[in-house]
Amino acid sequence: MLNNIYIKPIIALLTFILIFACSKDEDPEPANEEEVITLVTLEVTKVGSSSPIKYNFEVEGHDHGDEDHEEEDDDDHDDHDGEHTEIELEANSTYNVSMFIYNDTDPNNIENVTLEIIEEKDEHQIFYAITDELSGFSIASASDDTKDSNGDPLFIKTTWTTTGETSGDVVGYLIHEPTSKTGSTRNDFGGATDFEIEFEVHVE
């Protein structure tokens, strides 16, 4: 009888220690790390042409030093365009535009973050805010654009349409976990801004 009195608490104590030790040995669930974005590229191709023009945008906060930034037609991501980029378009024309998103922190191992954004399409939204002075210019989701599980377009592939001569600014956003997938201003979408790029469109 006395043996049972002492043995039962000892067994309970050993069981508790074993469970506690096992729980400490287990690795915690890895957190879903946010993607690192340092470079955004727009590939602009006039319908009927097979030669895209590439415009590179350095994401704010990622400094590459005082380089000569020029418009590029190759795959070199080391030289980023300056803060104020002008995109020249022709009047009465249609353009197919694809957005590519990179992490080029290590120039020898450039990561194409576009694939991750597409995979997490339900948690992301791209939005282009067009200023009022840019009349006769529109941006729509392309027919081959990525759509989320609700059928809402991601706007990673878009169609740009021009009419008469005009010029004005456009701001592009990648929004993380938007509260809405539609809107006419950035605030309509809620969520957090993963990056913001700005450029001036000239239609002649």
Image: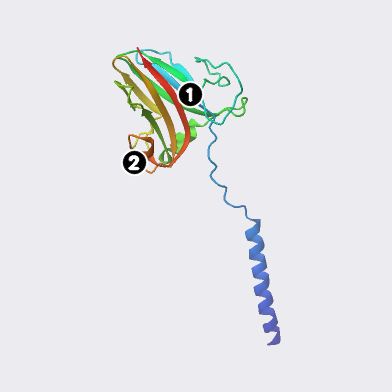
Q: Position of residue 166 (x, y in %)?
A: 33, 17
The C terminus lies in quadrant: top left
Q: In the rendered image, is residue 190 in sight?
A: yes
In this rendering, is residue 108 above or below 6?
Answer: above
Residue 145 seen: no
Mark 1 sits on what residue? 41
Q: Residue at x 44, y 20 (%)?
A: 43
Image side of residue 175 versus residue 38, left or right? left
Tell me: residue 73, above or below residue 40: above
Image coords of residue 181 (percent x, y): 35, 39
Comparing 46 with 182, the one in front is: 182
Q: Which mark is residue 82?
A: none
Report helix, strand or loop for mark 2: loop
User: Tag 2: residue type?
Assistant: Asn
Q: Is residue 191 above or below residue 172?
A: below
Camera-near label (1 vs 2) is 1
State the residue position of label 2. 150
